[in-house]
Image (spheres, rainbow, N blue to C red):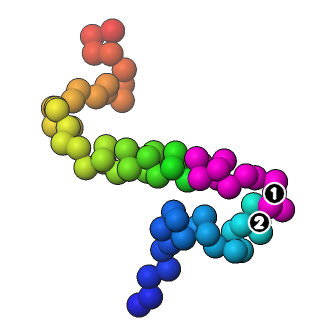
């Protein structure tokens, strides 16, 4: 199976992507900032998914379907 992922450097050098950026009037530096911001956000989200919760989900109280008890 072929890996079609590109590095950020490859994306910024790709002629087709550069042509689309020119057509959309997006500067290369602006696009690079967007790629970096997105990469940081994805990294943070995946790190958060791997984090161990401080309180196990089974111990977190959830409101009952009938509302507050005793009311």
Crowding at mark 1 (Cα within 10 Å: few <14, some 14-19, many 20+):
few
| Nearer to me, 49 or 40 | 40
Instruction: For residue 47, say whether it is visible.
Output: yes
Crowding at mark 2 (Cα within 10 Å: few <14, some 14-19, many 20+):
few
Q: Where does residue 1 sit, x and y in percent of width and height?
A: 41, 90
Which image quarter: residue 13? bottom right
> Who's the residue at 17% across and 32% down the image?
54
Which image quarter: residue 58? top left
Residue 26 lies in the magenta stretch: yes
Q: Quadrant of the C terminus?
A: top left
Say which mark, if any, is on residue 34.
none
In screen coordinates, is 44 left or right of 58?
Answer: right
In what element is the residue under mark 1? loop
In screen coordinates, is 3 left or right of 10?
Answer: left
> Who's the residue at 81% across and 57% down the image?
24
Q: Where does residue 48 sit, x and y in percent of width and height?
A: 31, 43
Residue 28 lies in the magenta stretch: yes
**Residues rendered magenta in the picture:** 22-34
Q: Is disc 2 in contact with disc 1, using a CB cutoff of under 8 Å?
A: yes
Instruction: For residue 58, say whether it is visible.
Output: no
In what element is the residue under mark 2? helix
Residue at the disc numbered 2: 20
Residue at the disc numbered 1: 24
**Image position of 71 with respect to 52: above or below:** above
Q: Where does residue 44 sit, x and y in percent of width and height?
A: 37, 44
> Who's the residue at 82% across and 54% down the image?
25
> Who's the residue at 52% across and 65% down the image?
9
Which image quarter: residue 56? top left
Q: CA distance from mark 2 to mark 1?
A: 6 Å
In screen coordinates, is 33 left or right of 44?
Answer: right
Q: What kind of secondary structure does the magenta stretch mostly adopt?
A: helix
């Amino acid at each position: 199976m072929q890996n079609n992922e590109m590095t950020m450097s490859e994306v910024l050098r790709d002629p087709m992507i550069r042509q689309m950026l020119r057509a959309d009037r997006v500067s290369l530096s602006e696009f690079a900032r967007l790629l970096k911001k997105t990469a940081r956000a994805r990294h943070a989200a995946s790190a958060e998914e791997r984090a161990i919760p401080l309180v196990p989900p089974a111990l977190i109280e959830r409101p009952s379907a009938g509302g507050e008890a005793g009311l």
